[in-house]
Image (cartoon, rainbow, N blue to C red):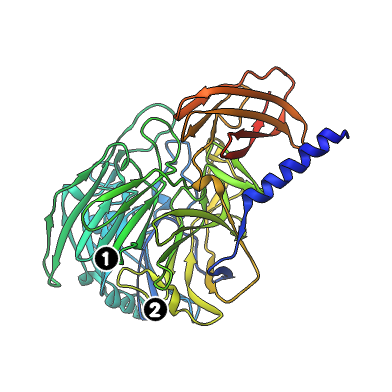
Amino acid sequence: MTKSINYILLAISLFFYNNAKSQSTPFNIYIEPMNITGLGGLQAYAFGQHNGKWLIVGGRLDGLHRRQPFAAFDVAGNNNQLIVIDPVSQQKWTAPITSLSVSLQEQLSSTNMEFHQEGNYLYIIGGYGYNTATATRKTFNNLTAIDVPSVINAVITGTSFSTYFRQINDPQLAVTGGHLKKINNTFYLIGGNKFDGNYNPMGNHTYTQVYTDAIRKFNLSDNGTIITITHLPTITDAANLHRRDYNAVPQILPNGSEGVTAFSGVFQPTVDLPFLNCVIIDSNSYTVNNSFQQYYNHYHCATLPLYSVSNNEMHNVFFGGIAQYYDSLGVLVQDNNVPFVKTIARVTRDAAGTMAEYKLPVEMPSLLGVGAEFIPIASIPQFSNEVLKLDDLTADSTLVGYIYGGISSTAANIFFTNTGTQSTASSQIFKVYVIKNSTVGVHDLNEQSIGTLKMQVFPNPNDGDFAVKFYLKESAETKISLYSTDGRKIEEFILKNLSAGENIYQPKIESSKLKGTYILTIETLYEKATQKIVIHQ
């Protein structure tokens, strides 16, 4: 190996090391698997809790929805039971919902409902499932209120629970794949879509799909008998609120008030890829944060929010799921097929409002996490919006909650080959611990999530014909280089006097024999970004 190649390898190694910038961390996360005998797998469900027991409603018993139209979201995969789980005694109880009205049965066996628990009542909105009257699938326009303590007791004792459910109809509530959150006394139905008809990815549209592109705000009055909804002015943004199956995480904002951040989600209006930005919602309006790019955990997964009053820092931890990017030995890999991932990451907002993304030194044990939920322990110190009080966790190790279910995949990319055997609904439960006062384990800062280059390669993987999109904060000379994984420079392109803002460049690769994994870098006088790309012939 020549001296020049050694220098290149050293430079790349130093760059990876500096770019990783392992950070000391305010806490660590430890997950401990546990199993409950006889508990089945479930994903994309709703939950409420009372006195340490969980009430699980709806969701799917199978894995990723199949590509075969006749089998996608089939009735056999509906969860037609109410499930009660006691994670401490590791017991579970079930009861069929057949005693309820058809309207209740249909919504309560649907998937991707929006839900929020207020006191004893679990409010469930929308959801996608089978409708008997039309003999097809639809997004339900119902709000159902469930008396959680009474239903849990009835399921355990085997007594009737039909009087503990109330339901109203409202066309504004026909939403699936969004989130129902509360800021102060107002409910926020954020994002999602109305999907009616049978799912069919084969180009023959047997459905209609309309994104809400909105934050629908309303007040809810419930005296235990009558539910009344008062709609407030809707916030609409077809560019930035056009997202579903994202993560909406309750927040304590820099000024100490309550809020919600909508992280990532699918799909961007002009391309079938996840959003990388986020939307910060407060009691008055919303702000799109385009200065921050989230590269990990793009699809709905279990999330853990923690806030430090002493540091005015808001931490959001994401557990696995699906993402356009993942880390491979310190190099950010972009895969536009948006695969299943194991990544556990946190996004932290500091006192100045700046957000940064960190990869944790722990991963999910498999390609797991999509459609799972984090269920907090109610006795853990928390704000009224269920954000945990990090400063109040004084022990070295604190069990803060559990993760249950989700989709478990056998491979990263299964969407185009999925026949129903490549993934399953997981029955796994994880205890989630917050570890403090530990010097073991560092969190790796994702420089590109806070940098200005915002580098993207598409398509990736590719056949050697690809484009690179990046942003320049000012007009600058830019160098794009392609290296083999052993440090050999394949190509280099010097781009002079590029304009500030978004730039797209399509390299002309000379060699027709390229095949495999390569390292692509973009470098200016003030910043550098690196990604791994895959070329196949």
Give the vertical position of 262 relative to 2 (above or below).
Answer: below
Q: Amino acid at mark 1?
A: Ser
Q: Secondary structure at mark 1?
A: loop
Q: Residue at x 62, y 38 (%)?
A: 531
Q: Are marks 2 and 1 in contact (CB under 8 Å)?
A: no
The residue beneath circle 1 is 99
Horizontally, residue 213 falls left or right of residue 418, namely left
Q: From the viewer's perspective, is 149 left or right of 19?
A: left
In the image, what residue type sits under mark 2? Pro
Q: Secondary structure at mark 2?
A: loop
Report which residue position mark 2 lands on. Answer: 381
CA gap between label 2 and label 1 equals: 38 Å
Name the one closer to the observer, 94 or 31.
Answer: 31
On residue 85, the disc is none
Residue 423 x, y percent position in the rendering: 55, 49
Q: Using the rendered image of the protein, determine whether residue 422 is visible from the camera's viewpoint.
A: yes
- Residue 224 lies, in percent from the top left, at 15, 72
Q: Position of residue 200 (x, y in %)?
A: 40, 34
Q: Earlier in the sequence, mark 2 or mark 1?
A: 1
Task: Identify the residue shown where x is 52% and y is 23%.
Answer: 497
Binning the other alpha carbons within 10 Å of mark 1 as few (below 14), some (14 to 19) or many (20 upward) gives few
Asked whether residue 486 appears in the rendered view, the answer is no
For residue 175, above or below residue 471: below
Q: Is residue 42 left or right of residue 50?
A: right
Q: What residue is at 13 percent from the left and 66 percent from the top?
A: 221
The image quarter containing residue 6 is top right
The quarter of the picture where residue 195 lies is: top left
